[in-house]
Image (tube, helix red, strand yellow):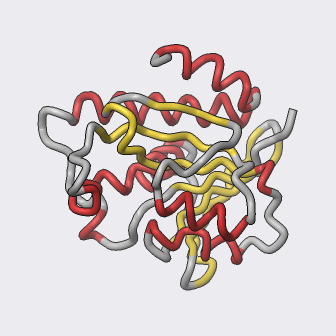
């Protein structure tokens, strides 16, 4: 079993974007950091990080500050990052709001943050946990991902974030395959 030792949550920095659809990756890592009493430290202008000490070893949580579409740039702060130890947490317009999906690898599905990471790592072979924000209007993706969720969507969003948090814990403690088996079966 390959151990996940890096959790990268995608989002945009700044209060303007805090509650938008595109910031789900940041939100889930903030939940984990809050639950585990972790402190965020600014490593440089590209990334903030926190360290989670688990029974399996240290796990570094990081949030790129380079905006979602340039998330790969922040990876250079972690020289020699082994992509097999990385789990990226992000939104996905192709999944229904409230749905999560975990994969060992795969394509970006048009997500520019994942495109940026794929380019930086020169590979698609890294794990990802996607959280649904769809269905999205096909011609208005940019505007859609930068909007907050509606009041009607919030119960599903809160449940999805909680489920993503549990999926991360399973991934770190029992491995990606165990997390896929436990959490993906609900939507397939």
Residue at image location 31% in from the left, 33% down from the top: 97
> Horizontal and vertical percent for residue 52?
68, 50
Number of disc labels: 0
Which quadrant of the structure image shows residue 12?
bottom left
- The answer to whether residue 97 is left or right of residue 100 is left
Nearer-the-camera pick, 81 or 111: 111
Residue 179 against residue 92 in the figure, above or below: above
Residue at image location 60% in from the left, 62% down from the top: 62
- The answer to whether residue 83 is left or right of residue 61 is right
Q: Residue furthest front?
A: 139
Q: Residue furthest bottom?
A: 45
Which quadrant of the structure image shows residue 171?
top right
Nearer-the-camera pick, 116 or 1: 116
Nearer-the-camera pick, 90 or 122: 122
> Horizontal and vertical percent for residue 164?
49, 34
Residue at image location 75% in from the left, 41% down from the top: 54
Q: Which residue lies furthest to the left in this view?
A: 151
Image quadrant occupied by the N terminus: top right
Which quadrant of the structure image shows residue 93?
top left
Q: Can residue 59 be seen in this view?
A: no
> Horizontal and vertical percent for residue 157?
30, 35
Q: Can residue 144 be seen in this view?
A: yes
Nearer-the-camera pick, 54 or 83: 83
Residue at image location 64% in from the left, 25% down from the top: 180
């Amino acid at each position: 079993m390959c151990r996940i030792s890096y959790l990268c949550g995608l989002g945009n920095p700044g209060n303007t974007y805090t509650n938008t659809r595109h910031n789900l990756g940041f939100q889930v890592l903030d939940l984990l950091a809050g639950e585990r009493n972790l402190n965020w430290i600014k490593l440089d202008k590209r990334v903030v990080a926190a360290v989670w000490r688990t029974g399996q070893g240290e796990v570094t949580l990081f949030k790129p500050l380079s905006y979602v579409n340039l998330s790969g740039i922040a990876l250079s702060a972690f020289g020699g990052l082994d992509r097999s130890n990385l789990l990226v947490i992000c939104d996905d317009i192709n999944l229904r709001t409230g749905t999560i999906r975990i994969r060992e690898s795969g394509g970006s599905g048009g997500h520019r943050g994942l495109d940026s990471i794929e380019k930086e790592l020169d590979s698609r072979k890294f794990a990802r946990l996607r959280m649904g924000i769809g269905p999205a209007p096909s011609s208005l993706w940019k505007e859609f991902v930068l909007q907050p969720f509606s009041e009607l969507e919030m119960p599903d969003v809160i449940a999805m974030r909680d489920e993503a948090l549990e999926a991360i814990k399973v991934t770190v403690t029992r491995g990606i395959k165990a997390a896929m088996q436990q959490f993906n079966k609900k939507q397939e």
